[in-house]
Image (cartoon, rainbow, N blue to C red):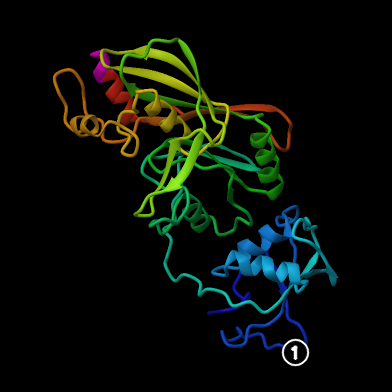
Amino acid sequence: MKDLATINRGVHQKQVQNVPHEQPSASQPKVQLLTISEEEAGQRIDNFLLRICKGVPKSHVYRVLRSGEVRVNKGRIDQLYRLVEGDVVRVPPIRMSEPSTQVVPKLEFPIVFEDSHLLIIDKPAGVAVHGGSGVSYGVIEQLRSSRPEAKFLELVHRLDRETSGLLLIAKKRTALTNLHEQMRDGLTDKRYFTLVYGDWKNARQHVKLPLHKYTTADGERRVRVQADGLASHTVFSLKKKFKEFALLEAELKTGRTHQIRVHLSANGFPIAGDDKYGDFPLNKALQKATSERGVLKRMFLHAHQITFTHPETGKLTTVNAHLPKDCDDFLRSLSGA
């Protein structure tokens, strides 16, 4: 175990009294004074502590906050205090997890848009956006590894591992908080292409079904339609019909976990290749080509467009990502092209 001497980049540390510069031992964690940088400004003190206190139980972080052991500029604060550049945060002795010795591969992804505030990539299917739940690392860890000079890289939102398409990464905290506010207020427009199995009838269809998150016995995260679940709204537009399938565009009005997948499955139109909520015999059949279609070895769900107000310029910005080749090839095979 180590204390806060090993924390995220960007935090400037000051030793108190005559503490030696070498790392304190796990048995002797020390008080730390952390000066808030420009990129850390704007976040709440509780979120800041949760981010830097690796391996510390959430309950313990809030306990030291309530006790007044955490000070900002020598004064007491509550957990809702938002940090300002130059603030000096006193963090009491807290034992930290050992930093991981695993080497994260340096990997860049197809860039659709980039400036000083934002990075938007076209995430491949099968790649997690972040480490956890049995995944050692994801997109964000690989990007940080490939860009060690970057002071700030944080996910603006998430995509399922099986989903491909547009993923926004903030390069400044101001951009992150601005985009989070836009998403919370319903001011962004996210659209997906998906291929469903069945005879879809309507040119445009609203689906409003409440969704409830739960965990299976083996620890897997799932979602189901449930009366007391969170209000959820998706608008589906028919783009093209095939003999047994339909290509839809899904427009998210809310952003719940697995929302598109569960809304479609609950209406009897499973997404082709969906291994959680889909038609499992169909998925198995799609692994082999037939005289009427090609092969599909992934879930057909692709985040193809997002519209938002740029956090710096204030301009309405729309970004697109073409269908991946494997999805496009499968559609062509259905059309007989």
Q: Which residue extends farthest left?
A: 291
Q: Position of residue 103 (x, y in %)?
A: 42, 65
> Relative to residue 155, is residue 192 depicted above or below?
above
Q: Position of residue 6 (x, y in %)?
A: 59, 73
Q: In the rendered structure, which segment of residues is drawn in magenta?
A: 333-337
Q: Is residue 335 magenta?
A: yes
Q: Main secondary structure of the magenta part?
A: helix
Q: Position of residue 12 (x, y in %)?
A: 71, 69
Q: Position of residue 213 (x, y in %)?
A: 48, 43
Q: Is residue 324 left or right of residue 187?
A: left
Secondary structure category for the residue under label 1: loop
Q: Is residue 171 magenta?
A: no
In the picture of the structure, the residue carrying the numbered disc 1 is 18
Of the pair 203 and 63, the residue shown nearer to us: 63
Q: Is residue 93 left or right of residue 212?
A: right
Q: Residues within 10 Å of mark 1 (few under 14, many from 20)?
A: few
* Residue at position x 72%, y 46% in the image: 174
